[in-house]
Image (cartoon, rainbow, N blue to C red):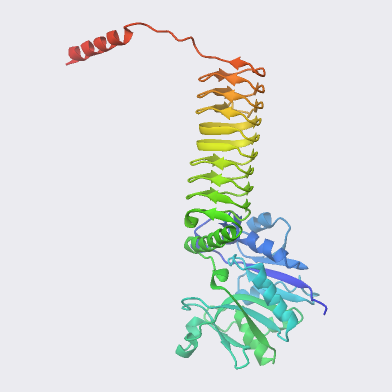
Amino acid sequence: MNIPDLAIIILAAGKGTRMKSSKHKVLHNLGGKSMLQHLMDKTALLKPLTKIIVVGAQKDQVEIAVNGQADIIMQEPQLGTGHAVNITKEKLCDFKGNVLILFGDVPLLSQVTMQKMVDNLNQTDADIVVLGFTPEDAKGYGRLKLNNKKGLEAIIEDKDASNKDRSISLCNSGAMCIDGTIIFDLLSGLDNNNSVGEYYLTDIIKVANLRGLKCAVVEAKAEEVIGVNSRSDLAKAEAFFQEERRQHFMDEGVSLTDPASVFFSYDTKIGKDVNIGPNVTFGIGVQISDDVTINPYCHIEGAIIGSGSSIGPFARLRPAVELGERVKVGNFVEIKKTKIGNDTKISHLSYIGDAKIGKNSNIGAGTITCNYDGYLKYQTVIGEGAFIGSNSALVAPVNIGAGAIVGAGSVITSIVEKNSLALSRVKQRELGGWATKFRQRKQHEIKIKE
């Protein structure tokens, strides 16, 4: 069987006023990636011949975000969802495949469900496939009324539904897959005889049935079709996204002590036998190898963590961090743009930035790399097996040789040769009896003031 070509239309012309944002609604993030990009990435797996995004306001924002991944069409004036699809006619005038219509503010729809809709249209005698779902509370949703052959007879809006219609639990998600050879002919049959004077895409079912065409329904999980129209909706969608990610990683061999308090990004990668404590957040770009322990209250972003390493508690790894195997990063340690060799320890209370640290090194408590002079960043290089004493300041650019020792409390500003000891403390002095005399003087001054 020849599989028809596929076109994707994503409707994103809503004004999104309830988001109360200067950013286009579909560009708000979910798991570190915009809602629109979630859809773009999943639809790419369907290998469509073309993608079209219909926008209203803030077209320039969408164009920048999409960066050539799809054609952008402006809907002006905005006369409803049926009108929004119909204005793609010029782009699809010679298209003979199937058209999948999605909504930019429904970001959790899976590629599996999209494929199911397309396959249903290709493998049955259906002319239109509508995506339905069964929510816990159907109030406010359009109902999908089926005939005795399980075909879709009508989409009944909640405000127009009778009590009998409202007993229907199967609801309309909005997504449709339509035979591209008839879609614009059907759209030409829509009218705007309603209270708002708009052309509703849902009315295409009525037009199709009047012409003797077959309309079918594919059902999705309710959480897949959650629509995002407000910050509250976005938080609900995020919760569903995170729950799916948590379950995915636990199924893949990751232990989460308190799953509900761990947050992942869309691209987080984690190996097997990794243990993650409570209150851990992963930003984008994190890759974790096997047998790693992430202790509680860590924030990790843009970091690669080698096998057998231990992070935290209360550690922060910022972008461009690469840890080797069996590295220990302890409590209240912040690291950014640094490569660290195997078996190195940075156990507590340190800031390491713009650095390269060799294997088997030890960075003492309170050590900082002074990498910024107010204008430029500079690199600190620490050789293999070096030992940096506590409360040391390494003023970059600086190079500390392999096996060198930096004495505690030192400020290092120049090269330290390998296997040498570097000290920069002021020589300790002791003034006998000074403390007693100081206290007596202060007590005398207080009495005079009284």
Q: Nearer the viewer, residue 212 or 318?
A: 318
Above or below 340: residue 65: below
Percent across and percent down for residue 376 are 63, 28
Q: Quadrant of the N terminus?
A: bottom right
Q: Image check: 154 left or right of 94?
A: left
The total of numbered circles placed on residues is 0
Q: Quadrant of the C terminus?
A: top left
Q: Nearer the viewer, residue 123 or 199?
A: 123
Q: Quadrant of residue 87?
A: bottom right
Residue 75 showing in the rendered view: no
Q: Image check: 124 left or right of 218?
A: right
Residue drawn at point x = 71 percent, y = 76 percent: 118
Percent across and percent down for residue 71 are 73, 63
Residue drawn at point x = 54 percent, y = 54 percent: 255
Q: Farthest residue to the right: give it.
A: 2
Above or below 390: residue 291: below
Q: Farthest residue to the left: give it.
A: 450
Residue 407 showing in the rendered view: yes
Percent across and percent down for residue 196 are 53, 78
Percent across and percent down for residue 186 are 69, 84
Residue drawn at point x = 75 percent, y = 78 percent: 180
Q: Nearer the viewer, residue 75 or 135?
A: 135
